[in-house]
Image (cartoon, rainbow, N blue to C red):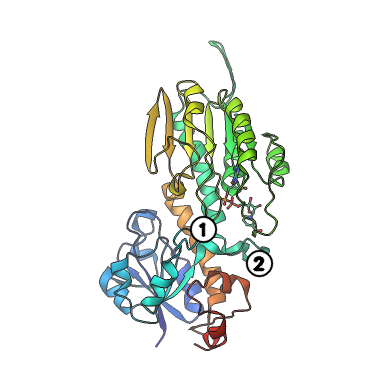
Amino acid sequence: MKMKLAVPKESNDSRVALAPDAIAKVSELGLSVIMQKSAGEQAYFPDESYEGATFLNREELLQTADAVLSIHPLSENELDLLSAGTVVISQFQPFNDERIANRLRERDLKGFSLDVIPRITAAQSMDILSSMGSIAGYKAVLEAAHYLPRYFSMMITAAGSIRPAQVLVLGAGVAGLQAIATARRLGARVEAFDTRSAAREEVQSLGAKFIEVEGAKEAEDSGGYAVEQSEEFLERQRKEVQARAKNADVIITTAQVRGAKAPLLIPADVVDAMRAGSVIIDLASSTGGNVALSVDNEMVERKGVKIVGNSYLAALMPQDASQLYSNNVVNYLKLLFRDGALHLDMDNKIISDTYITKPEKSNEANAENQ
Ligand code: NAD
């Protein structure tokens, strides 16, 4: 009998982990796909479009699954419905939730966390954080344009001239760079800052100005992720940012440090110094926020400045977001399964980094044969 890969409907997200064209690709790996009824509906992928998949209700789905693939982890109660040995593939955020691996182990589940895929060339086609980050950066600009009571582009009309909007992007990783590109396409003037010096050229190549702050700690051994900066550096950075923020119509913050609270880049007094009508979009709100006043999943207003806290903007573009997530996942599944069975190649960095419930070192050899 083929191993069954189950795809539940996401509870608080309009995306789905597999798009219709993935069914044939997954079946080539020797797995059959079972899906929760209407799992793709909110991403505009109706059940009929999943040719070759079987549809079940949620409870049946989880009870029959050999592997479960989702965007957000299942709840604790739902994990209890899974049989021992089930493979669970999701974004478990093991750096923010240190106990997650043990909670999965206690239930005898094999956990694979897609959000810790290493930032190496071989893993680019599986990098869900980049796919979702790029959409979030794009959407952040569109959200800001929606709330801003002004044009983004310069306008010269018979009724008078309008200056272009001034946009400040903090954190120029995947999301930040896409935000810069999108804001530029809309005609805004853009300034950006990142602690990684490699970001300077990328920012400049998109036609934005890079804000120079001396003395950033580099992230050489951290696999492409940022490291925490010294208090002294952060203070200098805050001063630079404060000066720019006063002139910004839009601020988009994307700064994250893996396994740590997001750095506070915009304190309340900086918000107070901004012009009424300005907009801040904080993409780091779910890990504490880059903006002192931002509230995760809410829009708050302070003296005419709107502050949107949203780390899941990719969910507002569910069709392409699901398609890209699905493409990334299929590439990952090609590594994880061979001839319809789990293939734990612990010499492969992508597998060993993402296998969060792997047995401790001494037992690792046995794991390969499980
Ligand atoms: P992220 O979402 O973890 O962080 C976003 C950005 O915030 C990063 O660029 C980080 O340097 C920046 N940041 C952290 N602290 C800051 C501070 N105090 N002030 C200003 N900025 C701060 O990162 P990400 O966007 O997912 O990826 C980061 C980088 O990793 C990418 O830009 C890229 O260079 C690299 N990457 C490599 C690959 C690959 O080679 N396969 C894939 C994806 C990303």
The amino acid sitting under disc 1 is: Leu
N-terminal-most mark, 1 or 2: 2
Query: Which disc is residue 367 wearing?
Result: none
Judging by the rendered image, the residue that carries numbered circle 1 is: 324
Rendered-image quadrant of the N terminus: bottom left
Rounded to the nearest whole Å, what is the CA distance between mark 1 and mark 2?
Answer: 17 Å
Q: Residue at x 40, y 26 (%)?
A: 302
> Which kind of residue does numbered mark 2 sit on?
Ala
Q: Residue at x 42, y 50 (%)?
A: 315
> At numbered mark 1, what does the secondary structure look like: helix, strand or loop?
helix
Label 2 beta carbon within 8 A of ligand 1: no
Which of the two discs, 1 and 2, sits closer to the camera?
2
Position in image of residue 76 (x %, y %): 32, 67
Against 355, is 232 above or below? above
Q: Residue 156, how many percent across, how many down?
A: 59, 16
Residue 281 seen: yes
Q: Nearer the viewer, residue 32 or 9?
A: 9
Residue 306 falls left or right of residue 229: left
Picture disc at residue 122: 2
> Considering the numbered disc 2 on the image, is that residue within a helix, a strand or a loop?
helix
Please, which residue is most extreme toward the top here? 159
Q: For the residue carrying disc 2, how many other residues have a C-alpha within 10 Å: few (<14), some (14-19), or many (20+)?
A: few
